[in-house]
Amino acid sequence: MESSLYHTLQNDFLFQGAPKPIAIEPCSGNKAAVLTVFLCLPRGSSGVPPPGQSGLAIASALIDISQQKPADCKDKSSGVRNRKHHLSTRQGTCV
């Protein structure tokens, strides 16, 4: 079963090309956000990950969104889903 899942993911368009965001979680104040991407790790010449490894990873980064237009965050065609967030009482903290 694991092998069939690997082949399904390998052929999925989400894993072709540059990493694509799977989540953007705005921080309090909407000046920064945590961006999460799903990555396909490099493989050897065989094209498959080493035994015992999936070849997949999830990575997150803190990004500056202060210069972004509000409409950019709501673009549903990009495949990014914004999470609802509750405002924290402390500014500058991620929620």
Image (cartoon, helix red, strand yellow):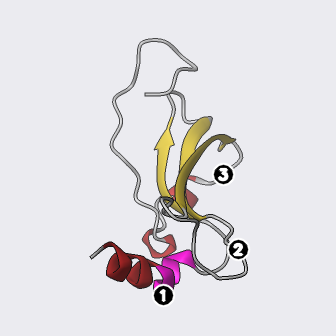
Alpha carbon of mark 2 to alpha carbon of mark 1: how far?
Answer: 17 Å
Tell me the CA gap for discs 2 and 3: 38 Å
Q: Mark 2 = which residue?
A: 44
Q: Secondary structure at mark 3?
A: loop
Numbered disc in front, either 2 or 1: 2
Structural distance between the alpha carbons of marks 1 and 3: 33 Å
User: Considering only vertical position in the picture, is 25 above or below 88?
Assistant: below
Give 40 or 61, whichever is nearer the viewer.
Answer: 40
Q: Residue furthest bottom?
A: 11
Please name which of the two marks, 2 or 3, marks the residue nearer to the observer. Answer: 2
Kind of residue indicated by mark 1: Asn
Q: Residue at x 33, y 82 (%)?
A: 4
The amino acid type of the residue labelled 2 equals Gly
Whether residue 14 is in magenta: the answer is yes
Which numbered disc flags the more N-terminal residue, 2 or 1?
1
- In the rendered image, which residue does mark 3 sit on? 68
| Pointer 3 local density, CA inside 10 Å: few below 14, some 14–19, many at least 20 | few
Q: Earlier in the sequence, mark 2 or mark 3?
A: 2
Q: Residue at x 60, y 81 (%)?
A: 16
Quadrant for residue 9, please give it. Answer: bottom left
**Magenta span: chief secondary structure:** helix
Q: Secondary structure at mark 2?
A: loop
- The answer to whether 68 appears left or right of 94 in the picture is right
First to last magenta residue range:
10-15
Q: Are marks 1 and 3 in contact (CB under 8 Å)?
A: no
> Between disc 1 and disc 3, whose residue precedes?
1
Residue 18 colored in magenta in the image:
no
The answer to whether residue 42 is left or right of residue 1 is right
> How many other residues sit within 10 Å of disc 1, few (<14), some (14-19) or many (≥20)?
few
Element marked by disc 1: helix
